[in-house]
Amino acid sequence: MFMSISTTGSAESPATDLGFLLHKHPGKVQRFTTSHGEAHVFYPEAGDEVCTAAVLLDVDPIALVRRGRGKGRAGSPDFALAQYVNDRPYAASSLLAVALRTVFRSAMKGACPARPGLADRPRPLRIALPAVPANGAGEGGGVAMTARLFEPLGWRVEAAAIPLDEAFPEWGDSRYVRLELASDSVRLADALQQLYVLLPVLDGAKHYWVAPDEVDKLLAAGEGWLATHPERGLIARRYLSRRWSLTRAAMERLELARLAEADDREVEEIDNAVEDQPEAADTENGEQHEQGHGRPEQQDQDQDQAPKPPSLAEQRRAAILAALHEAGAARVADLGCGQGELIGALLKDARFTEILGVDVSVRALQTANRKLRLERLPERQAARVRLAQGALTYTDARLKGFDAAVLCEVIEHLDLPRLPALEYAVFGAARPGAVVVTTPNVEYNVRWESLPAGRVRHADHRFEWTRAEFRAWAERVATAYGYSVVLRPVGPEDPEVGAPTQLALFRVADPAEAPMPTTTPEGGEPR
């Protein structure tokens, strides 16, 4: 199989800089041994104005079969028909993708110590692949698929179907295409990473068994472009040979990367609902210093108290259930569900017929799934609950149509400038019949003897409100989106500083009288 990479240049920026980028000298023919044959790198043309590097991969199909490659569920369909006579030596597939990684490993990393900064700049590129299998498998293959995969990345795509036999045009086209890609805006390192991923995707098969570590390879090669690709689901599914468990894991991690990029934050900052080590200073009299809904709760170590009073978290959940019963809710969305403590309480009450748990953290959802034992629940019980990944600062069609939504210890984990986006996504776009919001009362913090003055109850809290501040926010949101609101204390109420938690129950007003905002807050755009 054959592939060429061409670029243009000038006397000031010669095209032969391609040799520095590929770490292959234009004046030499080099040979590399791969696990399935030999790869040859040479330059058919090398000048200041035009330079072309070519890769010729000589595959030994007999050796490929003897090593057991291509067999099993992840193997190429060609091997089922003819192990020794097939397209593997000629059509660009996962064999070429692996060879590119072997031959151009440094180039794919964007390393160019001989010319610092050269690899960081895009340059005119033209990549030619004479024969690429583009199997549809019911997913719209052929020329159309090449455009769907490469055009969103900034490539101009020239693809032509190869006929089965030019002498017999009535036979129609084969499943192969002649592909040429051109761009002035793609870095060479990115181009090679994209080919490494997309060649097996076009083929729809791999010559080796797809193990769980393929998810890491996919995400590493797709860094910077895959998370925002409109066909990322198709790419993940076909790259991972349609292994459902691996595809789901990849999509969850890609969604986190997309949300982090949209919020200009690190993935670790978003996927932080499960802490590695809870802070020991955050407990007082058996209560949690508001670790946040779904965060680990530290239990009272004092064994002398009998009977043990309900914890603040338990009182909070009881208050939420009471508010949901008051609203007559049967279908409930737990927004920011964390590790599923509230969902567990909802499942115990038969009045709640449908429960949706949403959280941005993949780790939290995995923990919730494990703690709730969803896979072991009876079928009828399991059908009542779903877990989904999502960010509450973006509108989401999955949140529409619920009787009630719960934001339990959630809003204080958002930066204040992002709060209007959540307000619009929940109260404006999703618009459930009722919304229950709980948040810490910062006035009560002085009653926690182990909490230093001026500290918030959890390291991830971006703010904590007084009762007056929470009331002002709740009344503003209710007026803006056409809800009524009542506020209630949760937990032991102190005559001076109030209760440790404050709860707001929003009830939708007459839709005909409900004023709606005329603009979408920044960050509230549809997902």
Image: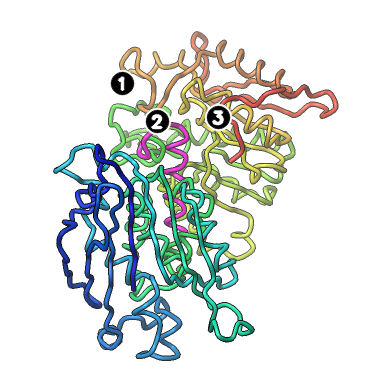
Q: Is residue 186 above or below residue 130?
A: above
CA neighbours of label 3 inside 10 A, class few (<14), some (14 to 19), many (20+): many
Q: CA distance from mark 2 to mark 3?
A: 32 Å
Q: Position of residue 10 (x, y in %)?
A: 29, 41
Q: Is residue 40 above or below residue 328?
A: below
Q: Which residue is mark 2?
A: 288
Which numbered disc covers residue 435?
none
Q: CA distance from mark 2 to mark 1?
A: 11 Å
Q: Residue at x 58, y 29 (%)?
A: 422
**N-terminal label among 2 and 3:** 2
Q: Quadrant of residue 72?
A: bottom left
Disc 2 secondary structure class = strand
The quarter of the image holding the N terminus is bottom left
**N-terminal label among 2 and 1:** 2
Question: Which range of residues does the magenta coloring cover?
Answer: 248-268
Q: Nearer the viewer, residue 16 or 120?
A: 16
Disc 1 secondary structure class = loop
Q: Which residue is mark 1?
A: 450
Which amino acid lies under the numbered mark 2 shown in the image of this protein?
Gln
What colour scheme has been applied to the protein in the rendered image?
rainbow
Which amino acid lies under the numbered mark 3 shown in the image of this protein?
Gly
Q: Position of residue 339 (x, y in %)?
A: 46, 45
Which amino acid lies under the numbered mark 1 shown in the image of this protein?
Ser
Q: Residue at x 46, y 71 (%)?
A: 204
CA neighbours of label 2 inside 10 A, class few (<14), some (14 to 19), many (20+): many
Q: CA distance from mark 1 to mark 3?
A: 37 Å
Q: Nearer the viewer, residue 124 or 185?
A: 124
Single out the mark in the foreground, 2 or 3.
3
